[in-house]
Structures are given as C-alpha cells and as structure tokens.
C-alpha cells in the first residue's frame, strides 16, 4: 500500500503536459438509481475540457509531456474513423502548438457518408489535422507501422514527429493518466459511504488498467469492472492482464494485481466495435431522458448497456456503483442516422 503522495512521486518521474480540467465531478444519478434498484454515481470525465473533453485528455497529457520533452513539432496517432482519441489528440496538439497527423483505420464496415464526415471527423478537420487512411481495422501492429512510416517521411523532410502508439509493445504512458485519476477518485469517495463497484469501458484498456493499478497501489479494494467495447471478454481480459503488468513495471511498483481483480464482461459488444445494438440505443435514450446526460454509441452507451445488463441479472442489486463517463459525445453526430429519440 502506498500513500497518495508516494504514488504521485512515482508519477512525477514522467513529463506531463497538464491540460485537463480536473478534478472532474462525481455526481449522483438519482433517477436511474431508482429505475435500476441501486445507488448510481457518475464520474464526469466527459468534463475534462479540451476538445469536447473525455478520458483521452488525461491519457494524452503524458504522451504530450513526452513529445514536448523531445522537442517534437508534430504528433501522429492512429484510430477508428470516429475515434475520440484522434480528435482529442488534434485538439491537444493545437493547445501546445504542434501539428497533427491522424491515420483513420477502417474498423467499422458499411458506414454511411454521415459517419465519414460528421462528429469526430468534422472536429479533426476543423482543428486542421492532416488525415491519412489505413485499410484494416484489426491490425494494430500494421497500423502502428504505417504511422511510423509517415513519421519517417516527416523526419526526412526535417520535421520532429512524435508517434502516439496504439498496440501493446509500447510503454503504456496513457495509463498513467488514470493512475493519477485513481488518486483523485480516492479523495472524492473517502468521506462517502463505501462503493461496491466501479464500471468503466475497456477498449485499448489504458483507462481500465490505470484505475485498477492506481486503486490497488493505494490499498483500495474497490472492484473495477471493464465493459469491453472492442473484443470478447477472454481476449480483453488477457489484454488488461498484460497492460497491468506493463504499467506496474513502468512505474517501478512492487504490486501484485491478481487475475481475480481483472473483471471484464462483453454483454453489450455484439455485433462488434463501433456497431450499434438495441441495448446500446436503449441505454443512450434512457440515460438522456432520466438524467439529461448524453452517452455515445461506441463507448459509454455500450458501457451503460453493460451496466444495465448486470443490474437486470441481479448482480448489482442495492449496490453503490460508480459509472466512469469517458466522454465521446461528438460521435453521436456521426451516428445520427442510427440514434433516434
């Protein structure tokens, strides 16, 4: 067990480009709580401030810290066409005076013209990012290699690029943002009645992993349940396991996070990443009408659908739950032809 100051000291070894509006609020959701028969709170990381906010701001503070330490003049990033990550990276780049190249991966099949032009794509273009394409959607190593090729071309022309990696095999700097967020959450819940579970989206897994590592380093046993939005539960659990180990090694922590601490469900995943299902549409509508809170179809809508599924199974009856809102609302406009009132 570490004190918050000791964990902050471990994080302070890594450069950080501070930009997020933090701490973000922890708010009760009384109407949904009544509907679901539990006590539900939301951690509002949709309010982190930069470029429409979201969880990626906390992650990118550490990547941009490294980029600025290396005196980069350009950042490069890869992600889905409607990626929140790339939109936030473009906004952060402008905040810190850097250019941005975005590689759009074809992760979602049979999309509309709206998907390709609105939402996060529109915002990235407004931010002046240069867009590239990559034809595959499930090839992280290939996508990273393609971005590195763009970076090499920039280097040959006298630029100083910094690549924000996608796949495992790279230092999980983004997870550090959520180790820090765990310290923030711990201070917020300390004076409150104990919570029974934290529920968060799990895709790249860095948000999920950072929270799990941070809470366990602080000696807090609060379960962290990841609702997978990218791959099946078994594959996602393996990814979380790997990234937990990578993150503890990066921080130099002597911390044992047992496999039993890695909770992942995939109740809301089908038919796949970025593809909308009825449960997700219902969760988006239900949350908006009950609480005036907007969720997105790719991440938070599926996480709320997963939470509702757990509740309907009786797994959360009368429990106190933190739902971690990771933002992503701009994607709603890219899915406007599928999301209706």
Image: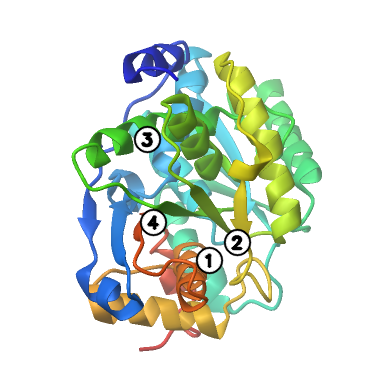
Q: Which residue is mark 4?
A: 327
Q: Is residue 31 above or below residue 127?
A: below
Asked if marks 2 and 1 touch (Cβ < 8 Å), the reply is yes
Q: CA distance from mark 3 to mark 1?
A: 22 Å
Residue 43 image offset from top left, x and y in percent: 31, 51
Q: Residues within 10 Å of mark 3 (few under 14, many from 20)?
A: many
Question: Please, what secondary structure does the residue beneath circle 1 have?
Answer: loop
**Image quadrant assignment for residue 48:** top left
Label 2 vs 3, first from the N-terminus? 3
- Residue 304, how many percent across, how many down? 44, 68
Residues 120 and 300: in front is 300
> Is residue 160 something that shows in the picture?
no
Q: Is residue 240 above or below residue 228?
A: above
- The image quadrant where one finds the C terminus is bottom left
The numbered mark, 4 or 2, whose residue comes first in the sequence reads 2
Q: Position of residue 230 (x, y in %)?
A: 65, 59
Determine whether the residue tagged by mark 2 lies in a helix, strand or loop: loop
Residue beneath disc 1: 298
Q: Measuring 42% from the left and 59% from the top, which residue is drawn there?
A: 328
Residue 327, how many percent across, how many down? Answer: 39, 56
Q: Please name the residue that numbered disc 3 is placed on.
A: 181
Name the quadrant containing residue 330.
Answer: bottom left
């Amino acid at each position: 067990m570490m004190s918050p100051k000791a964990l902050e000291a471990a994080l302070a070894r890594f450069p950080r480009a501070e930009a997020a509006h933090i701490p973000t609020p922890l708010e009760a959701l009384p109407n949904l709580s009544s509907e679901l028969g539990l006590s539900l709170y939301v951690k509002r990381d949709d309010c982190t401030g930069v470029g429409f906010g979201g969880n990626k701001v906390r992650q990118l503070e550490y990547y941009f810290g490294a980029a600025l330490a290396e005196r980069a003049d350009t950042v490069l990033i890869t992600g889905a066409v409607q990626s929140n990550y790339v939109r936030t990276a473009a906004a952060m780049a402008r905040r810190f005076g850097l250019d941005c190249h975005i590689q759009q991966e074809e992760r979602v099949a049979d999309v509309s013209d709206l998907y390709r032009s609105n939402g996060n794509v529109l915002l990235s273009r407004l931010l002046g990012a240069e867009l590239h394409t990559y034809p595959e959607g499930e090839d992280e190593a290939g996508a990273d290699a393609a971005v590195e090729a763009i970076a090499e071309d920039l280097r040959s022309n006298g630029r100083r690029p910094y690549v924000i990696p996608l796949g495992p095999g790279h230092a999980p700097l983004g997870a550090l943002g959520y180790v820090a967020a765990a310290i923030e959450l711990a201070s917020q819940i300390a004076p409150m009645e104990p919570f029974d579970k934290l529920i968060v989206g799990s895709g790249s897994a860095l948000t999920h992993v950072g929270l799990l590592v941070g809470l366990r380093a602080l000696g807090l046993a609060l379960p962290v349940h990841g609702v997978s939005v990218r791959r099946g539960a078994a594959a996602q659990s393996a990814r979380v396991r790997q990234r937990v180990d990578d993150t503890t090694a990066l921080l130099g922590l002597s911390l044992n996070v047992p496999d039993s601490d890695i909770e992942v469900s995939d109740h809301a995943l089908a038919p796949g990443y970025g593809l909308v299902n009825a449960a997700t549409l219902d969760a988006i509508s239900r949350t908006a009408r009950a609480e005036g809170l907007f969720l997105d179809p790719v991440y938070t809508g599926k996480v709320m659908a997963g939470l509702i599924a757990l509740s309907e199974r009786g797994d959360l009856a009368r429990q106190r739950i933190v739902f971690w809102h990771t933002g992503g609302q701009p994607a709603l406009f890219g899915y406007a032809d599928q999301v209706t009132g």
